[in-house]
Every structure is written in structure tokens, then in C-alpha cells.
Image (spheres, grey):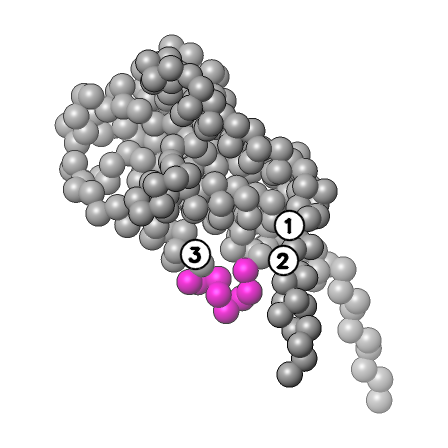
């Protein structure tokens, strides 16, 4: 057995970590910003001021009516999870949204399509899912499916944008693993096991499923466009002469 094999196995991951800021500068900067914001809100600000900030950037109906831009952009600068309570579902959510979604899939999107397009996909998924979810909430309120308190519910974080790039990253998964990956992207928001308040799941689950749908639709569009381009660029078959 080659004694250098274990070291060789570590070479690739170590190189990936070392070159990550250079290969994915936008994602790296965003991750750093999210971590700094999490520490600032959770450990530096007084508890009442931190709660007030979270309430202000929450994308609930009242805030979207009063200050929509601040709520939408501010919400994308915080993540609703934990980095320390490793035995909780909040930590699992952080691993999926911040670690896998932003750290891996947004970085892959940046390398595949470039920084501006990656930012547009992430922010577009965040904004579109939030706004469509708000429309769903209004409908559910009119039908009596959600309680009135949902208008002021706390709803902030990066998970809708992360869910969008998680779905888009289906393009980068080996072909035989794409269906299990897509099933994971759809299933994890449903894994909480909370009771549905009516014929619809809770509004955050609706938002995650919508953002996944946006990501899958974008992935299908990219794949279809690439297929058409390959067919258009393929050389015409030579004439068969007898």
C-alpha cells in the first residue's frame, strides 16, 4: 500500500479550501458577511435591540407593506439558525442553508455562471419566493386557513435563496444522482413534521417549495438551452454517396 495515499486523499479538499476565496469571491464574501452579522446580532447587540432588528427585517405582510426594500434586502443578510447547538433542528437547517446552499451551491453557481448571474439567481429566488408566499398568505387569510397573527410573524433569513441554488445545482450533480438530489431539496423543508394550519402547510414551507420550483425551472431552462445550442452547433451529417 502506498504510504502517501492518505495525504493524497487530503490534497484535493485542502486545495479546494485554500483556493475557495479566489474561485468564488462573491460567495466567500457573502459567507463572511453572514457570519459577522450572525455574531453581531447574537452576541454584540443587546437582546432587545437584536429582537427589534430581526422584527424590522422580517418579510411578513406588515413589513412588506411598510418598508418592502429594507425587509427584503435586510432579511438576506441574516440567517435564522444556530452554529453552536449541534443537536437541534436549527443546526441542521444551518448546515443545509448556509453550508450546503450558500457555501457549496452558490459557489458552484458562481463558478458556472459568473458572480453577477449567481447573485441574480440567489436574490431573485429570495425575492420571488417571498413575494409569491405573501400572496399565498393573503389568500389563506381570506379563506381562514391561516391565523391573523401570521401578518406579524417572524420570517427572515437566507433559506429561500439557498433553496433556489440548491435546486439549480441539480445541473452539477452526476446524472444518476439527480433524482435523489431533487427529492432531498423538496423533502427537507417538509421534514419538520409540524401540523398544517389548513389545506396548506405553514407559509415558510410554502416559500421553500416555491423557491425550489424556481430553481428547478431555471435548471430545466439552462439544460434545454444548452441542448439546443449543441444541436445547432453540431456538424451536419455528410451526404452518403454510392
Residue at numbered disc 3: 182
Q: Quadrant of the N terminus?
A: bottom right
Secondary structure under the numbered disc 2 in the rendered image: helix
* Residue 120 seen: no
Dominant secondary structure (helix, strand or loop) of the stretch shown in magenta: helix
Evaluate if marks 3 and 2 touch, with contact meaning CB atoms under 8 Å apart: no
Q: Which residues are magenta?
A: 173-180
Residue at numbered disc 1: 17
Q: Quadrant of the C terminus?
A: bottom right
Evaluate if marks 1 and 2 touch, with contact meaning CB atoms under 8 Å apart: yes
Q: CA distance from mark 3 to mark 2?
A: 25 Å
Q: Identify the residue shown where x is 46% and y is 28%.
A: 38
Residue at numbered disc 2: 13
Q: Identify the residue shown where x is 54% and y is 60%.
A: 173
Q: Identify the residue shown where x is 49% and y is 48%.
A: 100
Above or below: residue 205 compared with residue 228: above
Q: Identify the residue shown where x is 61% and y is 49%.
A: 108
Horizontal arrangement in the rendering, residue 51 relative to residue 44 (left or right): left
Of labels 3 and 2, earlier in sequence is 2
Q: Position of residue 178 (x, y in %)?
A: 48, 62
Q: Nearer the viewer, mark 3 or mark 1?
A: 1
Q: Magenta includes 64?
A: no
Q: CA distance from mark 3 to mark 1?
A: 26 Å
Q: Position of residue 6 (x, y in %)?
A: 62, 70
Amino acid at each position: 500500500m502506498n504510504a502517501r495515499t492518505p495525504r493524497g486523499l487530503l490534497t484535493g479538499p485542502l486545495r479546494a479550501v485554500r483556493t475557495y476565496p479566489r474561485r468564488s469571491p462573491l460567495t466567500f464574501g457573502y459567507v463572511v458577511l453572514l457570519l459577522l452579522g450572525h455574531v453581531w446580532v447574537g452576541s454584540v447587540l443587546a437582546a432587545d435591540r437584536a429582537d427589534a432588528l430581526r422584527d424590522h427585517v422580517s418579510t411578513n405582510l406588515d413589513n412588506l407593506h411598510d418598508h418592502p426594500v429594507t425587509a427584503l434586502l435586510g432579511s438576506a443578510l441574516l440567517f435564522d439558525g444556530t452554529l453552536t447547538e449541534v443537536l437541534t433542528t436549527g443546526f441542521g437547517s444551518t448546515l443545509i442553508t448556509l453550508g450546503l446552499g450558500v457555501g457549496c451551491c452558490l459557489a458552484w453557481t458562481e463558478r458556472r455562471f459568473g458572480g453577477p448571474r449567481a447573485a441574480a439567481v440567489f436574490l431573485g429566488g429570495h425575492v420571488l419566493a417571498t413575494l409569491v408566499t405573501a400572496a399565498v398568505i393573503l389568500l389563506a387569510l381570506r379563506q381562514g386557513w391561516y391565523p391573523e397573527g401570521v401578518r406579524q410573524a417572524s420570517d427572515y433569513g437566507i433559506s429561500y435563496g439557498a433553496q433556489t441554488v440548491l435546486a439549480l445545482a441539480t445541473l452539477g450533480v452526476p446524472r444518476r444522482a439527480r433524482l435523489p438530489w431533487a427529492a432531498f431539496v423538496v423533502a427537507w423543508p417538509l421534514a419538520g413534521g409540524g401540523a398544517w394550519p389548513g389545506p396548506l402547510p405553514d407559509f415558510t414551507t410554502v416559500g421553500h417549495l416555491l423557491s425550489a420550483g424556481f430553481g428547478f425551472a431555471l435548471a430545466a431552462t439552462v439544460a434545454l438551452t444548452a441542448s439546443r445550442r449543441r444541436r445547432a452547433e453540431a456538424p451536419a451529417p455528410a451526404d452518403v454517396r454510392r
